[in-house]
Amino acid sequence: MLPSLFAESHWSAETGVAAPGSFEAQIEAARKVVAGLDPSRRLLLFVNVPALHQPNWFYLDGAERDDSLAAKGDTRESHAAALEYVDRHIGELFELMSARRDCFAIVCSDHGTLYGEDGLTGHRVAHPLVWTVPYAEFVVEAVR
């Protein structure tokens, strides 16, 4: 549904949830779009950060996939490791987007994930921690 609201959509297996380098691939896709854009043209860019979605076990050193678990080996620790991965790279995205002009950024999650709260695991369940969506908006000033 959401991709149909945009004039362009760029997806590949490298940008999907099962790819450990997914966020870097997303940034590279954005870089190509920006490079091909007339500098005077405005851009609305939606980037889904798949690293924060399950699976995320592969971001934690030494973690292994465990098919006997509902989350296939994902834990709070692997989720935190995925967040650290995103934190290492998100500045690149902000730099890219503010290279042309000030960038109004909206950062939010699409849903939460349960890691044992109330005996539940995952995100396909009606629970306040799944429904709670972190949100921030701010301006990244252009490099002048």
Image (cartoon, rainbow, N blue to C red):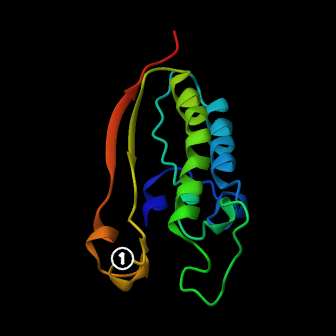
- Residue drawn at (58%, 86%), measured in percent from left and top? 69
* Residue at the image point whose x is 66% and y is 59% from the top: 59
Specify the farthest residue to the left: 128
Q: Nearer the viewer, residue 26 or 109?
A: 109
Quadrant for residue 124, please give it.
bottom left
Query: The N terminus lies in which quarter of the figure?
Result: bottom left
Looking at numbered disc 1 in the image, what kind of residue is underneath it? Glu
- In the picture of the structure, the residue carrying the numbered disc 1 is 117
Question: Residue 138 location in percent, x, y?
Answer: 34, 32
Q: Is residue 42 above or below residue 86?
A: above
Is residue 64 left or right of 50 when viewed as pictured? right
Viewer-proximal residue, 54 or 120?
A: 120
Q: Position of residue 92 (x, y in %)?
A: 61, 33
Residue shown at 62% from the left, 48% from the top: 85
Q: Position of residue 35 (x, y in %)?
A: 66, 30
- Residue 65 lies, in percent from the top left, at 69, 77
89 lies left or right of 94: right
Residue 53 lies, with reference to residue 39, above or below; the image says below
Using the image, determine if residue 68 lies above or below residue 22.
Answer: below
In the image, taking residue 62 as reference, residue 77 lies left or right, namely left
Outermost residue, top direction? 144
| SS label for mark 1 | helix
Neighbour tally class for label 1: few under 14, some 14-19, many 20 plus, Cα within 10 Å: few
Q: Nearer the viewer, residue 72 or 144?
A: 72
